[in-house]
Amino acid sequence: MANKLVIVESPAKAKTLSKILGKSYIIKASMGHVRDLPEDKLGILTDKEFEPEYRNIRERRPVINEIKQLANSVSAIYLATDPDREGEAISWHLVKAANLEKDKIPLRRVTFHEITKEAVEEAFEHPRTIDMKMVDAQQARRILDRL
């Protein structure tokens, strides 16, 4: 029975990973970003050191809700989004949107540059935390794009 949740960005990657990792893992695709700045206003608090005001993307709410539900029945969550600043930010946004940090379930960030058995196993043997410097870099870029 599956007792670990792995979150990736794309359904194609989810399908391939499920073949590599086997039945003890539930693999879900976030379909990319799950939160963004609002479309109807600036969404940046200029009086609070340019703090972004993120909102869940409406089309991603079912994914967020499914991840919340699955988090209640697993022993660990692996954030396996792409190994770049966008992927790092997507992992961070998933944690925030689904309130995963409040569940006290181990959150592990895993990255790999190729989807091979060897690369995936290596990544899962050496998990890490979310790199907030990369998240901050992505947020700075997003804020500058908006301004």
Image (spheres, helix red, strand yellow):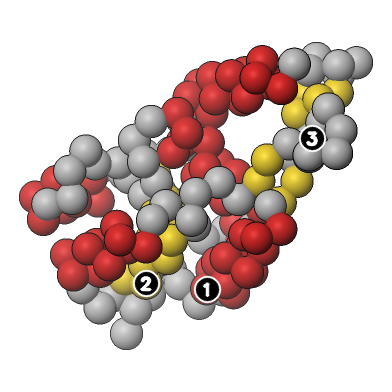
- Of marks 2 and 1, which one's residue comes earlier in the chain? 2
Q: Amino acid at mark 2?
A: Ile
Cα distance between the residues tagged 2 and 1: 9 Å
The furthest residue to the front: 40
> What residue lies at 45% left-to-right and 28% top-to-bottom?
85
Quick check: marks 2 and 1 in contact, CB under 8 Å? yes
Q: Tell me if residue 57 can be seen.
A: yes
In the picture, measured across the screen, residue 111 lies left or right of residue 143, that is left
Q: Nearer the viewer, mark 3 or mark 1?
A: 3
Q: Quadrant of residue 147?
A: top right
Residue 53's mark?
A: 3
Q: Amino acid at mark 1?
A: Leu
In this view, the residue in front, 126 or 13, is 13
Q: Amino acid at mark 3?
A: Glu
> What residue lies at 36% left-to-right and 67% top-to-bottom?
27
In what element is the residue under mark 2?
strand
Q: Position of residue 119 (x, y in %)?
A: 14, 46
- Of marks 2 and 3, which one's residue comes earlier in the chain? 2
In what element is the residue under mark 1?
helix
The furthest residue to the left: 118
Q: Nearer the viewer, mark 2 or mark 3?
A: 3
Residue 26's mark?
A: 2
Q: From what the image shows, is residue 45 above or below residue 34?
A: above
Q: Position of residue 130 (x, y in %)?
A: 47, 37
> What residue lies at 38% left-to-right and 30% top-to-bottom?
84
Per the image, the residue denoted by label 1 is 70
In what element is the residue under mark 3?
loop
Cα distance between the residues tagged 2 and 3: 31 Å
Q: Label 3: how many residues lie within 10 Å, few (<14), some (14-19) or many (20+)?
A: some
Q: Tell me if residue 99 can be seen.
A: no
Cα distance between the residues tagged 3 and 1: 26 Å
